[in-house]
Image: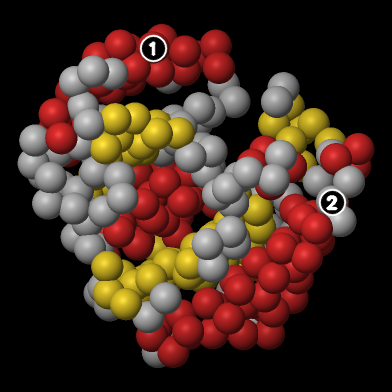
Amino acid sequence: MNLESLTSEVCKIAKAGGKFLSEERKVFNRNKVEEKNAHDYVSYVDKETEKLLVQKLSELLPEAGFITEEETVEFTENEYYWVIDPLDGTTNFIHDNAPYCVSIALTYKSEPIIGVVYEVCRDECFYAWKDGMAHMNGNQISVSNTGDMNKALVGLDLPYNDKQYKPVINHLMNTLYGNVSSIRINGSAAMSLCYVAIGRFDLWVEAYIKPWDFMAGALIVQEAGGMITDYRGSDNFVKSHHIVATNNLLHENTLSLVTPFIDSL
């Protein structure tokens, strides 16, 4: 399997999904939005984009199974899986607010070997393959070299499990606000990971997220020279729901902020 050439094809598929999202955004009807859980939304756009991606990826690699957010395809046991979020940042999309993206990962025995994230609003395609470095729109990318927390631009996001996560986010905001360069909330886990990979964020943390939220972006961070673990500091993050992604230099400092909350998550 030639991962580089396969990644190139996945980028084309992700962009096709992004083109569909862009066209649908022009005529989007907010009345057709469904609420899966409290403040957790899905629309016909998510589902139709996922169907498009599944069809094209099935043709590209017929032997691979699927793990998808909207469950438009049946799960079957396999060594290879496509892990898909057809629209990461649905709430942003609904409100016509950037960023939102298509996220596609290929995993082998649960480990990501290809990661592609296409951000629609800025026409940016982030991608990586195992041991092939990370790229955006044809250019190699790398994490920042910020080693001073006081100078760090921090990415945080707000999971839907607000009651469980509120003590964590309150602690992070109280501790970081005024002691770092600034804080940003993207509304898309996949994009936040890519922002770490390209050096726009120096670190990012979130919890209660699913494999389709982070699998592609995680590989891109790693191949860009960054570090990604769960809140315990374990690199077996694929089996977790809490993620810490940094430029490597700030990882221990970041872990110290979240490890006290592990037992409550």
User: Which residue in the protein does label 1 denote?
Assistant: 170
Where residue 79 sits: x, y (%)?
50, 69
Q: Is 92 on the left or on the right of 44, as rendered? A: left
The image quadrant that residue 22 belongs to is bottom right
Whichever of labels 2 and 1 marks the residue nearer the N terminus, that label is: 2
**Dot 2 alpha-carbon crowd within 10 angstroms: few under 14, some 14 to 19, many 20 or more:** some
Residue 75 image-quadrant placement: bottom right
Residue 201 position, x and y percent, is 30, 45
Labels 2 and 1 touching (C-beta < 8 A): no
Q: Which of 115/109 is in front?
A: 115
For the point 89% across and 46% down, the residue is 29
The image shows a total of numbered marks equal to 2
Element under disc 1:
helix
Q: Which residue is mark 2?
A: 28
Which amino acid, mark 2? Phe
Q: Is residue 111 visible?
A: no
- Identify the residue at image location x=55%, y=17%: 162
Residue 186 vertical placement versus 47 (above, below) = above
Instruction: Identify which residue, 196 or 36, lies in the foreground.
Output: 196
The figure's colour scheme reads secondary structure
Residue drawn at the location 26% of the way across and 53% of the way down = 199
Percent of width and height locating residue 242 = 40, 33
The crowd level at tag 1 (other Cα within 10 Å; few <14, some 14-19, many 20+) is few
Residue at (28, 18) in percent of width and height: 177
> Three-letter amino acid code at disc 1?
Asn
Rendered position, 43 above or below 12: above
Quarter of the picture holding the C terminus: top left
In terms of secondary structure, where does tag 2 sit?
A: loop
Disc 2 from disc 1: Cα separation: 34 Å
Which of the two discs, 2 and 1, sits closer to the camera? 2
Q: Position of residue 35 (x, y in %)?
A: 80, 31
